Image: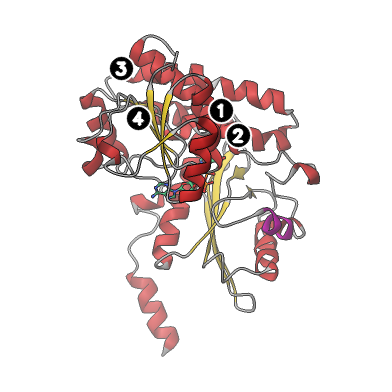
Amino acid sequence: MIVKESSKAIAEMPGIFQNPAFMGHEQVVFCHDEETGLKAIIGVHSTVLGPALGGTRMWNYANDAEALRDVLRLSRGMTYKASISGLNLGGGKAVIIGDSRKDKSDELMKKFGEYVDSLSGRYITAEDVGINTHDMEMVKSKTDHVTGIPESMGGSGDPSPVTAYGVFMGMKAAAKYRWGTDNLEGKKVFVQGVGHVGETLVKHLSDSGAQVMINDIHEDTLERISKTYNATIVRENLFDLDMDIYAPCALGATVNDETIGRLKAEVIAGAANNQLADELRHGTMLREKGIVYAPDFLINAGGLINVYSEIAKYDRAEALRRTEDIYNTTLTILTEAETHGITTHQAALKVAEERVAKKREQQRA
Ligand code: NAD
């Protein structure tokens, strides 16, 4: 009876491979272990440019479908982030379903490491939301296909400062494009989320003489950062603030139907992934409103560039040099978008997709 019912359920599933949400992934691995309670999904979007690299996120998803959607979207994003940054890496990501404070154990992380190892390097993992250094040590005890490990273990350490530097470079390029100068002195910049990346970004901005406004859900963090960098705390009507630049550094999808109409910023440049709730529609709305949007997956790639140094064996100075290049790439993308009458997000995707397509053709030849 159970067999019959489950085969009926499978037969009724809509065509997965035809579903646009599947986004042409090469491989999706469902990992289940009853003993440790592990429920994970590894998404390998593309290995055309190299092994699929992307972090593991542990999150209490409302249901399995939400977890699947997240891993598919995030792993695809990694393909484009690596491609546009000129890295020989593909795109992948993993999600572990569960509450990272209650459901995690060393045994669960080790089991996950065994699944990563079973992919023989097609997927390389790293830290993401809900996963810490200790967890990565557990994973590493079962597989070598791990990056972003602490410097004390021979790795490249916390990627966040490099991510922040790249975001700062992307922001300066967008300013240059918008105002003809990349000098941020006196510019009013609102940084939403002052965590690992946001704090370093605030530091760069403050050093440049910008007027920085900050918001976060943690009051103690806000107070500390406000004092350290002379930043103004803002708590209400965030999207009605008088600002020149909006830097989303907390959550995705903050650029949406509700916020675009209210935003007074002329530039959007931040670290958060998937800032546009709807890539095409909201990208178009920004374009029509004359707001310069620096594509998130382009300007937040510094961390990935840094992590890649563990594989490509280059040093921190080289990682920073490559991250600095985000400035030039951003300017090129913004100009391309204008030339072709498309959104900046579309222009960035086009460049990223073309590099993957070219490599695929070479591999077929
Ligand atoms: P983090 O968790 O250290 O910081 C996020 C901060 O946002 C925290 O201080 C949190 O309290 C705050 N926050 C959460 N919800 C908020 C809300 N509703 N309003 C205001 N503040 C809120 O994360 P991070 O490593 O700094 O990353 C920030 C963003 O950048 C994330 O979206 C992440 O996916 C993205 N990103 C990070 C890296 C990296 O190297 N760390 C690389 C690429 C992209």
Number of residues whose C-alpha sits closer than 10 Å to that of mark 2, classed few (under 14), some (14–19) or many (20 or more): some
**Badge 3, how many Cα within 10 Å: few under 14, some, many 20+?**
few
Task: Kindly tell me whether residue 359 is visible in this rendering.
Answer: no
Q: How far apart are marks 4 and 3 (CA)?
A: 11 Å
Of labels 4 and 2, earlier in sequence is 2
Mark 4 Cα within 10 Å, few/some/many (few <14, many 20+)? Answer: some
Q: How far apart are marks 2 and 1 (CA)?
A: 6 Å
Q: Earlier in the sequence, mark 4 or mark 3?
A: 3
Q: What are the residue bounds of the magenta stretch?
A: 133-138
Inspect the image, locate mark 1, and give the three-letter code of the amino acid beneath it.
Tyr
Give the CA separation, mark 4 to mark 2: 27 Å
- Distance from Cα at disc 2 to Cα at disc 3: 31 Å
Q: Of helix, strand and loop, which mostly describes the magenta segment?
A: helix
The reply to whether discs 2 and 1 touch (Cβ–Cβ < 8 Å) is: yes
Q: Earlier in the sequence, mark 1 or mark 3?
A: 1
Indicate the amino acid at tag 3: Glu
According to the picture, the residue beneath numbered tag 4 turns out to be: 346
Asked if the residue at tag 3 contacts the one at tag 2, i.e. Cβ–Cβ closer than 8 Å, the answer is no
Q: Which of 208 and 105 is in front in this view?
A: 208
Q: Nearer the viewer, mark 2 or mark 3?
A: 2
Identified at 21% across, 35% down, the residue is 262
Counting from the top left corner in percent of width and height, residue 19 is at 34, 54
Residue bearing the label numbered 3:
338
Q: Report the side of 105 relative to 91 (left or right).
A: right
Q: Which amino acid does label 4 sit on?
A: Gln
Labels 4, 2: front one: 2
- Quarter of the C terminus within the rendering: top right
Answer whether residue 221 is visible to the viewer in this image: yes
- For marks 1 and 4, the one nearer the N-term is 1
Looking at the image, residue 282 sits to the left or right of residue 313; the answer is: left
Placement of 246 over or under 136, stated as above or below: above
